[in-house]
Amino acid sequence: MLRAYAWLTFCVMVWGSNFVFGKILVQYFSPTLLTMLRLLFIVLLLIGLSIYKKNLKRVNKIDLLALVFLGVIGVFINQWSFFMGLQTADTTTSALILATTPILTGFLAAIFLKEKLTIRMLMGSMLALIGIYLVVTKGNLTSLHFEKGLLWIVLTMITFAIMIIMTRLLSNRIDPLTITLYSNVIGFIVSIPFAFLLDNPLRISTRLSDWAFLIDTAIVVHGIATLIWNQNIRYVDASKASILSNLEPFVAMLMGLILLFKPITGMEILGSLIIVSGVVISTYSKNR
């Protein structure tokens, strides 16, 4: 049990660090090209894993259409908007906005999956919005400046929530690895033309170290960490695992201090605590 918690904590640290990793990468690669390259390495990993597990399967036309939608919205636009946002958005604020994804997912589940919308969800949502407002305004409550980069991160959060709902629907008929493989392949294919149309100027590093960092983070963040999480989540209560995942913004905050020399402010800590409290409150009834 303790070993499972240790591995899950490792995954949370990796995913929380991804905000800082992305911030570093967009300095050397233009965002759409970076999306394409990261998806390329993820797809290669997934194909290799599927061959190893002998899990290459065909899907019917209806499910394929759903997977195309998932690949475009939940993979390509999700990854692209993430890197677009990190060009200017603060890493801590970005992590805090994405931390509210379970709340939006709950609302979408109430609409499309007919799951119950509870008072706790509404209360938690209001609390999380207050926390985001404090972080974005930096405590100056009369001045709300929502920069363009954060709008991209909001789009990332929305597409992530849609991806969760779509995956939940498809998982009734298709195994998770097949869903992940098809959606990422489609996302990668869609990203290819846009990498050369949207990025102006096209920015690409010629340093081997930057490419190694790109490949390593793609494999570790989206490959190894996901596999470790799925392998160990069975040994831990879902409610406790969700609490662990709420530590991601704090990891992003700490990694921003270590790698980007970004100071941590009191308002960020206060806002983080309020947002995470809101998420815990809103998801408590569901985990229960």
Image (cartoon, grey):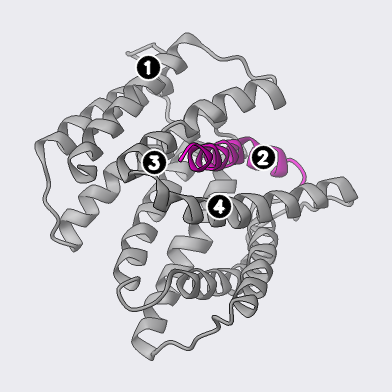
Which span of residues is magenta-colored?
Answer: 1-29
Magenta: main secondary structure equals: helix
- Rendered image quadrant of residue 86: top right
Q: Nearer the viewer, residue 150 or 258?
A: 258
Residue 84: image location, x then y, percent: 58, 47
- Tell me which numbered mark, 3 or 2, is placed earlier along the sequence: 2
Q: Is residue 29 visible?
A: no
- What is the distance, in whole Å, between disc 1 and disc 4 at their CAs? 43 Å
How far apart marks 3 and 2 lie (CA) works out to 23 Å
In the image, 252 versus 224, the foreground residue is: 224
Q: Which residue is mark 4?
A: 228
- In the figure, residue 146 lies in which quadrant? top left
Mark earlier in primary sequence (2, 4): 2
Residue shown at 30% from the left, 34% from the top: 279
**Closer mark to the observer between disc 1 and disc 4:** 4
Q: Which residue is mark 1?
A: 143
Secondary structure type for disc 4: helix
Amino acid type at mark 1: Ser
Mark 3 — residue? 241
Q: Position of residue 82 (x, y in %)?
A: 54, 47
Residue wearing tag 2: 21
Q: Looking at the picture, which amino acid does disc 4 mark? A: Ile
Residue drawn at 47 percent across, 42 percent down: 153
**Mark 4 Cα-neighbour bin, 10 Å: few <14, some 14–19, many ≥20:** some
The answer to whether 81 is drawn above or below residue 241 in the figure is below
Distance CA(mark 3)–CA(mark 1): 36 Å
Residue type, numbered disc 3: Ala
Q: Amino acid at mark 2?
A: Phe
Give the secondary structure at mark 1.
loop
Q: Earlier in the sequence, mark 3 or mark 1?
A: 1
Q: Is residue 3 magenta?
A: yes
